[in-house]
Image (cartoon, rainbow, N blue to C red):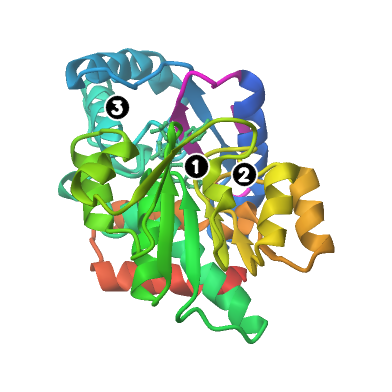
Amino acid sequence: VQFNSVIGPYKGGLRFHPSVNLSIIKFLGFEQIFKNALTGLPIGGGKGGSDFDPKGKSDNEIMRFCQSFMTELYRHIGQDVDVPAGDIGVGGREIGYLFGQYKRIRNAYEGGVLTGKAVGYGGSLARKEATGYGLTFYMREMLKANNITLEGKTAIISGSGNVAIYACEKAQQMGIKVLAMSDSSGCVFDENGINLDVIKDIKEVRRGRIKEYLNIVQSAKYMENTGNIPPIYSIKADIILPCATQNDITIESAKVLVENGTIAVGEGANMPCTNEAIQYFQEHNVLLAPGKAANAGGVATSALEMSQNSIRASWTFEEVDKKLENIMINIT
Ligand code: NDP
């Protein structure tokens, strides 16, 4: 879906998930227009994807799907036309396969056609971390404006994908204790604080299920998803960072969170809170960081990746992280 290119090429993520349909891609693309404009960088709004289910597929199967997908997509994209990136089910591995096929078809190195590339062939340092880091910067700024500090606070983070993992990393660096994370099957609760190395190994290396956390940390608890309130939202914490998918926090979960004394909710995912949940939070003075602003760090850093591709330079991790932090401060 190519929505708007008034201030720059269409830009948004590609999603591979069985739930994908045109309606979802349209709402995501529409949101993307405003989010991208909020970054202050010259990028328009678009989104894409497929109902292909990558779960349980081998690397070879993923590669073949990405190549076929790009064989059709290539005629609609380009570094000045439409610049896709990753989203649910599309990470560095998939971007690599997509980029390779684009390069093969075009017979040219056009680095700026996709973002979220690996650092070895035109990617930006800190892009992988950017959405999660940006969310945490935004949360810090929002709380600061309300005279609340992050140190010593507790948090729960739904999801254990790209956004969730790096939101957790930055949150821990800022002194927050992350008590629980989840995937679509259930959540793990670790009252000593989530061991992120274990989560990274399960999700980024072995592509396993979050339940396997208990094989390493026996003292943690696992709660399976049943009923209409994901069990992660029954855990008491100061800060809630929904980083999985849309409509994750319904009014039922919102009521439990308010009862548990939640101070703030930061939308890492796109539209993770339903409208009724948002209204409930507002009526009960729970601070809310809306996804359109709070998760804009990913696309902002994608635009920084495009800048580096254009000037054929690569900035250090610290340089990109600092630029991201400033962008998030400006957005807040
Ligand atoms: P990933 O595919 O890396 O991770 C998604 C996570 O959410 C996984 O843990 C997945 O669990 C879980 N999940 C997916 N669907 C459901 C569901 N129906 N119920 C419960 N859990 C679910 O995706 P990202 O981390 O990249 O994206 C997460 C969210 O952030 C999305 O809303 C995306 O649009 C948004 N976003 C992402 C950006 C980025 O830079 N990546 C930028 C801005 C927003 P499982 O493995 O079991 O499926």
Residue kind at label 2, given as amino acid type: Pro
Is residue 208 located in the magenta-colored stretch of the structure?
no
Task: Identify whether 168 is placed above or below 78.
Answer: below
Distance of label 1 from label 3 (alpha carbons): 23 Å
Instruction: Give residue 244's mark.
Output: 1
Label 3 belongs to which residue? Answer: 98
- Residue pictured at 23% horizontal, 31% vertical: 108
* Depth check, front residue: 262 or 331: 262
Q: Is residue 26 left or right of residue 202?
A: right
For the residues marked 2 and 3, what is the alpha-carbon distance in whole angstroms?
Answer: 28 Å
Q: Which residue type does callout 1 highlight? A: Ala
- Residue at image location 53% in from the left, 75% down from the top: 140
| Disc on the earlier residue, 2 or 3 | 3
Q: Pinpoint residue 323: horizontal percent, then vertical percent.
A: 41, 71
Estimate how packed mark 1 is, as few (under 14), some (14 to 19) or many (20 or more) residues with alpha carbons within 10 Å. Answer: many
Disc 1, SS: loop
Determine contact: label 1, label 2, CB under 8 Å.
yes
Residue 76, percent across and down? 47, 23
Q: Please provide the residue range marked out in magenta.
A: 1-21
Other residues around mark 2 within 10 Å, as few (<14) / some (14–19) / many (≥20): many
Q: Is residue 263 visible?
A: yes
Q: For the point 60% across and 68% down, which residue is it?
A: 331
Of the numbered discs 1 and 2, the one sitting upstream in the chain is 1
Look at discs 1 and 3 and give the one toward the viewer: 1
Q: Is mark 2 within 8 Å of ligand 1?
A: yes
